[in-house]
Amino acid sequence: MVEAGGITSLVLAAPAILFLILICWLIVRHIRLRPSNERSWVNDNEKMATAEFEGDEVTIRNVRDFNWRSTRDYDEKWIDLKVSLDRVSKIWFVLEYFDPSRRQMAHTIMSFEMEDGTRLACSIEVRREKGEKYHPIRGMFKSYELIYVWATERDIIGVRTRCRKKSVTHLFEAVVLGPGNERRMLESYLRRTNKLSTDPEWYNTITNTCTTNIVRHVNEVYPGRVPRALSILLPGLSPGLLQRNNLVKMTGSVEETLQRSIIDHRGESWDGVSDFGEWIRQ
């Protein structure tokens, strides 16, 4: 027979027990969450790129080529682009500060230039569902999938320089050490793109972002080239790392190079007809 004191203790403990049960259920549910490529995506994340290799040629399908008038007003266009892997001549690094007053937060992009002047950029991003907004805290808890967005520069750089009024965008030419490493970098990106098309992954604000993936690609081609650093987690702090490790071409001090590398004013003045990549590099 249960005494009155025992019943009272059970009643008092019941909320704590139920809370623990709820926490355990949420943890198990979180662990069981699986990323998917089949969701209702926003238009600019709707299609995933894939690469089809044939010797030295590769055809990249679902390259985004939007014409952005604003972040909400655009002409949607997806294209297939065929390039020669042995014709990659340069690699460019783009650093976008979302808000210059918050220098830690930034987005990073790589762009590949071919000998004929063709340029193809890849932005590693959160793949958003319709009605969904990004938040870095949510990004740590299996809330967003990861996507490699392949796009023309007039799209992926143009939307930043021409339509985002607060952001500041910098363009640097990468320092590539050793012949053929431009090709190896592009191949590394494309292999990962294909993997994501069949094996989706969660974006993670700390471990699986635009910059952490760029570092993985660089270190795959040049083992140990980019050391561990806080600026990999906070890419807005990366200019010092870029200089110390000779990752991009610098002209003068870091501050002088940052000032010279701003391309927003050039993007804003684009005539809409000329090659956008050439225009911002004038």
Image (spheres, helix red, strand yellow):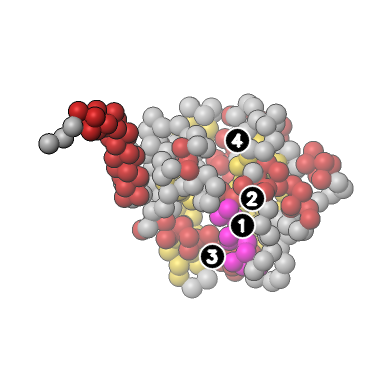
- Pair 3/1: label in front: 1
Near mark 3 (Cα within 10 A), the count class, few <14, some 14-19 or many ≥20, is some
Of the image marks 2 and 1, the number of the one nearer the N terminus: 1
Q: Tell me the residue that label 4 is attached to.
A: 160
Of 121 and 239, the residue lying toward us: 239
**Residue 220 drawn in magenta:** yes
Of the image marks 4 and 2, the number of the one nearer the N terminus: 4
Asked whether residue 243 is in view, the answer is yes
Compared with 162, 171 (above or below) is below
Inter-mark Cα distance, 2 to 3: 22 Å
Q: Tell me the residue that label 1 is attached to.
A: 215
Of the image marks 2 and 3, the number of the one nearer the N terminus: 3
Of 19 and 193, the residue lying toward us: 19
**Which kind of residue does numbered mark 4 sit on?**
Arg
Name the residue: 52% across, 44% down: 205
Q: Tell me the residue that label 2 is attached to.
A: 232
**Is mark 3 in CB contact (under 8 Å) with mark 4?**
no
Query: Helix, strand or loop at disc 2?
Result: helix
Of the image marks 1 and 4, the number of the one nearer the N terminus: 4
The image shows residue 100 at horizontal and vertical percentages of 70, 31
**Which kind of residue does numbered mark 3 sit on?**
Glu
Give the side of residue 271 with respect to residue 57, left or right: right
Compared with 44, 198 (above or below) is below
Near mark 2 (Cα within 10 A), the count class, few <14, some 14-19 or many ≥20, is many
Q: Tell me the residue that label 3 is attached to.
A: 187
Query: Helix, strand or loop at disc 1?
Result: helix
Q: Which residues are magenta?
A: 212-222
**Is mark 2 in CB contact (under 8 Å) with mark 1?**
yes
Of 103 and 82, the residue lying toward us: 103
